[in-house]
Image (cartoon, grey):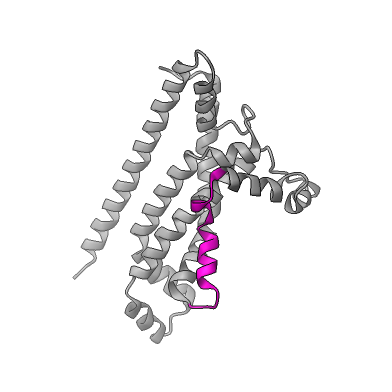
């Protein structure tokens, strides 16, 4: 049941794409979630709807939009190509697709976490002279840690399992964009590929279980620390 070289490369690439995608989407997700949780402005429902579009649209549609915008002939893609930073049909493009697909899950989890924080604590800190950044990093974010961990776990799982947007945007290039889900699909579509499909399925299940376990341990540790700091 050991993976061969191509399967190992696909696994490592999927892990890299997922981690980079989630890391890149996290700051933007935090900002958008805080904005939704703490402010009111004209067009807020529309703004929220746009943020959640990747959850609603078919992944292939999202991938095609990315191809139009970031492809070699797209408005953003041409600029990136001129700067020597092309992402179409590169692993960085796969990371972008993973980030876009995981982004809404982060926003939803973080918004719920931010809204659950007692606003009286934030207002009291502001009354005592604390600035917005100090309130956020000293009160809001620590009290939202469990939501953040849950969001990161969901986002990583979504990014790791991303298929439709990735293959539409960056295709399947061995060693470059052929992630584990794409490799699994190709095994299933190839006569005699049942063995490889089974191996990659078991690996995907193992990665999901490990990530879920790590998230559960972090949540447990966070809950224990919160209980220990209580009255």
- The residue lying at 62 percent from left, 31 percent from top is 172
- The residue lying at 43 percent from left, 68 percent from top is 137
Q: Which residue lies furthest to the top in this view?
A: 192
Q: Can residue 96 be seen in the rendering of this structure?
A: no
149 and 172: which one is in front? 172
Q: Which residue lies furthest to the right in this view?
A: 82
* Location of residue 151 in the rendering, given as x and y in whole percent from the top left corner: 40, 54
* Location of residue 170 in the rendering, given as x and y in whole percent from the top left corner: 65, 38
Q: What stretch is highlighted in magenta?
A: 40-59
134 and 8: which one is in front? 8
* Location of residue 144 in the rendering, given as x and y in whole percent from the top left corner: 36, 63
Q: For residue 174: magenta?
A: no
168 and 8: which one is in front? 168
Left/right of residue 17 with respect to residue 170 in the rendered view: left
* Location of residue 145 in the rendering, given as x and y in whole percent from the top left corner: 36, 60
Q: Is residue 212 above or below residue 10?
A: below
| Quarter of the rendering occupied by the N terminus | top left
- The residue lying at 61 percent from left, 44 percent from top is 63
Left/right of residue 96 with respect to residue 38 in the rendered view: right
Q: For residue 51: magenta?
A: yes
| Quarter of the rendering occupied by the C terminus | bottom left
Q: Can residue 108 be seen in the rendering of this structure?
A: yes
């Amino acid at each position: 049941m050991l993976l061969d070289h191509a399967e190992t490369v696909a696994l490592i690439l999927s892990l890299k794409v997922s981690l980079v995608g989630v890391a890149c989407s996290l700051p933007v997700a935090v900002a958008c979630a805080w904005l939704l949780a703490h402010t009111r402005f004209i067009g807020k429902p529309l703004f929220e709807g746009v943020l959640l579009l990747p959850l609603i649209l078919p992944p292939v549609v999202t991938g095609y939009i990315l191809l139009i915008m970031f492809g070699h002939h797209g408005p953003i893609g041409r600029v990136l190509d001129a700067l020597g930073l092309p992402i179409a049909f590169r692993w960085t493009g796969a990371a972008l697709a993973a980030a876009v697909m995981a982004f809404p899950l982060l926003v939803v989890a973080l918004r719920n976490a931010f809204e659950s924080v007692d606003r009286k604590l934030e207002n009291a800190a502001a009354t005592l002279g604390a600035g917005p950044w100090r309130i956020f990093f000293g009160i809001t974010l620590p009290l939202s840690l469990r939501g953040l961990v849950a969001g990161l776990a969901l986002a990583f799982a979504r990014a790791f399992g991303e298929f439709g947007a990735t293959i539409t945007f960056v295709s399947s290039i061995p060693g470059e964009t052929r992630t584990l889900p794409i490799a699994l699909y190709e095994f299933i579509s190839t006569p005699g590929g049942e063995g490889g499909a089974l191996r990659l399925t078991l690996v995907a299940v193992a990665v999901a279980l490990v990530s879920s376990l790590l998230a559960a341990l972090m949540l447990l540790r966070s809950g224990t620390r919160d209980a220990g700091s209580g009255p």
